[in-house]
Image: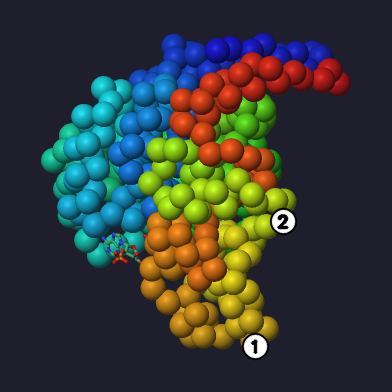
């Protein structure tokens, strides 16, 4: 898939082809489309379906105890011959065990997030793995480059789930990161259509990471009620909150209103923690409690109207990418 864009005097080649794109070359995949390793969605079924469709599927270790992670990796290896990876949020005390499992199971690609890219990058690369790290600012993208990562995922304010505090949108973030790093750059946040993939690449990204669109797929491991809720969401139905703890974009449901009530009493961090409690995300997205659970999804959910098999999502993305024209200026 390729497309030649003419902006008057400036010409820019936007190319998704395997042999020309930095991301497809790096991960040995067909299209520079990576599925975000979203917690409670990204088991072996979703990751292998994305990889089998020509993208890069990621198993989301953030919602898996070590034995579950191992099982998912093993099943993913059975379900696809194509490359896939594991997303590891660097927050759990048993992180070393998780890394060990990834190495023992022969995983070739790791996306780390929510931590310092220096911690594991070199050690993983010495074992032959490719490492990408997720950031929400240009400053941290530069730290990733210093840490020697193979690629940087820069995720804008539109994204679902955990997010940066600065509210920098993808539209502003990607060109800035592009100006400051030379490593392959993956744009994330606000991307669910082929036109948005193309826009991200025009802004300087080499590829994209897509979360929300893959959350509403047949293969995602989330609760069916949650998937059906995603496709009903409209513009303005999500909000970035909990900046005092860990900023997160979620649906404005009863749980969100409970948090708002705490804010109105004066931003008491202890009360916010109490209201959040434990395992809210599991309650909402995996157990399907749409009132009391934490429902993490991006702004782009307003553009997602149907739960589809991954293969159909890919067909749509590629068709839209090719169909998107560019006005002359
Ligand atoms: P909580 O501390 O509220 O709860 C932990 C949840 O994670 C529980 O549901 C628990 O399952 C499950 N879990 C899975 N593996 C482990 C493990 N090895 N150790 C402890 N708990 C585990 O956290 P959250 O649910 O808010 O977040 C869970 C993880 O996901 C965190 O690492 C967080 O940073 C990450 N996350 C990432 C997001 C993103 O956008 N990238 C968004 C939200 C969270 P059980 O209930 O069965 O014990």
Whether the residue under disc 2 has CB within 8 Å of ligand 1: no
Q: Are marks 1 and 2 in contact (CB under 8 Å)?
A: no
Q: Which residue is mark 1?
A: 265
Q: Position of residue 310 (x, y in %)?
A: 46, 31
| Whether residue 24 is visible | no
Crowding near pointer 1: few (<14 within 10 Å), some, many (20+)? few
- The furthest residue to the left: 104
Crowding near pointer 2: few (<14 within 10 Å), some, many (20+)? few
Describe residue 43's horizontal placement relative to residue 266 as left or right: left
First in sequence, mark 1 or 2: give its number: 2
Q: Quadrant of residue 19?
A: top left
Residue 176: assigned label: none
Compare residues 184 and 44 and report the one nearer the observer.
44
Q: Is residue 271 above or below residue 289?
A: below
Q: Secondary structure at mark 2?
A: loop
Q: Quadrant of residue 267?
A: bottom right
- Coloring scheme used: rainbow
Between the C-alphas of marks 1 and 2, the distance is 24 Å
Q: Position of residue 128 (x, y in %)?
A: 22, 31
Q: Which residue is mark 2?
A: 236
Compare residues 263 and 245 and report the one nearer the observer.
263
Describe residue 286's horizontal placement relative to residue 185 as left or right: left
Q: Is residue 313 above or below residue 318?
A: below
Point out the image quarter for the C terminus. Answer: top right
Point out the image quarter for the N terminus. Answer: top right
Residue at the spot x=48%, y=85% of the render?
Answer: 270
Describe residue 211's horizontal placement relative to residue 301 as left or right: left
Compare residues 22 and 211 and report the one nearer the observer.
211
Residue at the spot x=51%, y=26% of the render?
Answer: 312
């Amino acid at each position: 898939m390729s497309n030649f864009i003419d902006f008057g005097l400036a010409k820019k080649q936007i190319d998704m082809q395997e042999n020309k794109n930095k991301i497809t070359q790096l991960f040995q995949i067909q299209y520079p489309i990576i599925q975000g390793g979203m917690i409670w969605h990204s088991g072996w079924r979703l990751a292998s379906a994305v990889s089998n469709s020509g993208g890069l599927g990621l198993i989301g270790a953030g919602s898996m105890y070590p034995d579950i992670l191992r099982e998912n990796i093993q099943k993913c290896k059975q379900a696809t011959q194509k490359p896939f990876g594991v997303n590891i949020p660097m927050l759990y005390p048993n992180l070393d065990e998780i890394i060990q499992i990834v190495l023992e199971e022969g995983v070739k690609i790791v996306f780390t997030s929510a931590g310092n890219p220096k911690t594991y990058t070199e050690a993983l690369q010495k074992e032959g793995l490719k490492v990408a790290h997720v950031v929400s600012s240009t400053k941290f993208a530069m730290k990733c480059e210093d840490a020697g990562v193979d690629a940087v995922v820069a995720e804008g304010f539109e994204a679902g789930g955990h997010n940066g505090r600065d509210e920098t949108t993808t539209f502003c973030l990607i060109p800035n990161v592009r100006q400051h790093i030379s490593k392959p750059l993956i744009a994330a946040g606000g991307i669910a259509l082929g036109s948005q993939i193309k826009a991200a690449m025009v802004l300087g990204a080499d590829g994209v990471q897509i979360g929300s669109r893959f959350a509403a797929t047949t293969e995602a491991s989330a609760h069916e009620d949650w998937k059906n809720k995603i496709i009903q969401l409209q513009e303005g139905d999500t909000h970035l909150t909990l900046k005092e703890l860990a900023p997160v974009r979620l649906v404005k449901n009863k749980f969100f209103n409970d948090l708002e009530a705490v804010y109105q009493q004066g931003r008491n961090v202890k009360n916010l923690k109490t209201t959040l409690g434990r395992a809210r995300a599991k309650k909402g997205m995996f157990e399907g409690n749409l009132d009391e659970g934490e429902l993490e999804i991006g702004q782009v959910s307003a553009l997602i109207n149907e739960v589809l098999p991954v293969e159909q999502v890919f067909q749509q993305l590629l068709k839209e990418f090719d169909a998107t024209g560019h006005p002359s200026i």
